[in-house]
Amino acid sequence: MAAKRRILIAGNWKMNGLKKDARSLAGALGTKMSKLKSKPEFEMLVCPPAALLGPVLDAVKGKGIAVGGQDCHANEGGAHTGDTSAALLKSMGCKYAIVGHSERRTDHAETDAMVKAKAEAAHKAGLSAIVCIGETLKQREAGRTKSTNKKQLAGSLPEGATARNTVIAYEPVWAIGTGKVATPAQAQEVHALIRAELAAAIGEAEAAKMRILYGGSMKPGNAAELLALPDVDGGLIGGASLTVADFWGIAQAV
Ligand code: PEP
């Protein structure tokens, strides 16, 4: 029997919003969640900029919305100006940390080994790691979609990864913030590949339970067909997570 995986609708706010915006967006989502009559079929997560974690955690308290960091450092503490440790995220009340987002791989030259170390730090602190992978347009056009994702997954997957402590996010770089979304066939092909690679790495049973999110221009209008794919277990959403109507619209597509 196929494993039942709870859909994760995760918002990556990136470097957007001021304190007042964060409060009103998180507050409005909290109000929507608390009006639901039964437990939703999805889990909702918001990942604000680090400086806004406090106000967002306050705004969603008791509303059934998880909060996560957009990154964490691989070390537990020390001389790392401007960075955030996984233990600090955990102590604030976070449940997740995104690691290896393509913007961090590009802007901060993060390698697979660094992403793996960050995911392991997240686990050590008691957080679930959302490990991002995905090919660029150049790699896709060169026929290297599968090999790129296989290599990134193998290099970034933390030791001891389980379906409880790890989520994979497939985010084709060419689809992030561009309005170009992967077709259902393109998304399912890579998601199935990721699940097969996970099965080889951590065993079939654990791979069947692990959530694999799609990220890249997911919107209310395209979410339903992506979320209905057999190996798509949610979305990592950037632009559309910044408005209540769009983010809630995607959650409703579940
Ligand atoms: C992202 O930042 O992870 C992302 C998928 O962005 P967008 O939804 O804007 O493409």
Image (cartoon, rainbow, N blue to C red):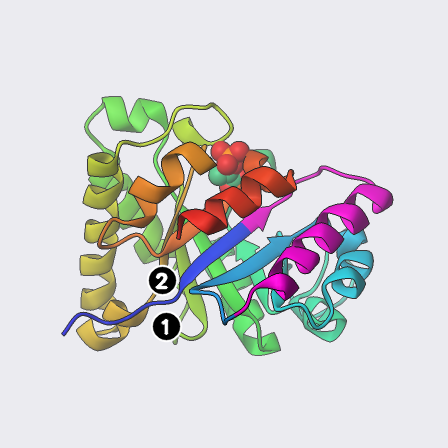
- Magenta stretch, main secondary structure, is helix
Residue 211: assigned label:
2
Whether residue 222 is visible here, answered yes or no, is yes
Q: Give me the residue at 82% from left, 57% from top.
A: 55
Which element is circle 2 on? loop
Image position of 48 with respect to 167: above or below: above
Quarter of the image for residue 212 reads: bottom left
* Residue 188 % position (x, y): 22, 44
Q: Which class describes the residues within 10 Å of circle 2: few (<14), some (14-19), or many (20+)?
A: many
* Residue 56 % position (x, y): 76, 57
Q: How far apart are marks 2 and 1 (CA)?
A: 7 Å
How many marks do you count on the picture? 2
Q: Give me the residue at 59% from left, 46% from top.
A: 12
Q: Is residue 98 left or right of residue 2?
A: right
Q: Which class describes the residues within 10 Å of circle 1: few (<14), some (14-19), or many (20+)?
A: some
* Residue 93 % position (x, y): 71, 72
Q: Give me the residue at 78% from left, 60% from top.
A: 59
Q: Does the magenta stretch include residue 26?
A: yes
* Residue 154 % position (x, y): 31, 56
Quadrant housing the N terminus: bottom left
Residue 103: assigned label:
none
* 115 vs 14, nearest the viewer: 14
Quarter of the image for residue 142 reads: top left
Disc 2 vs disc 1: Cβ atoms closer than 8 Å?
Answer: yes
Which element is circle 1 on? loop
Determine which residue is flagged by label 1.
Answer: 163
* 108 vs 149, nearest the viewer: 149
Q: What residue type is labelled 2?
A: Arg
Labels 2 and 1: the sequence-earlier one: 1
Whether residue 66 is visible here, answered yes or no, is no
Q: Is residue 123 magenta?
A: no
- Residue span colored magenta: 11-37
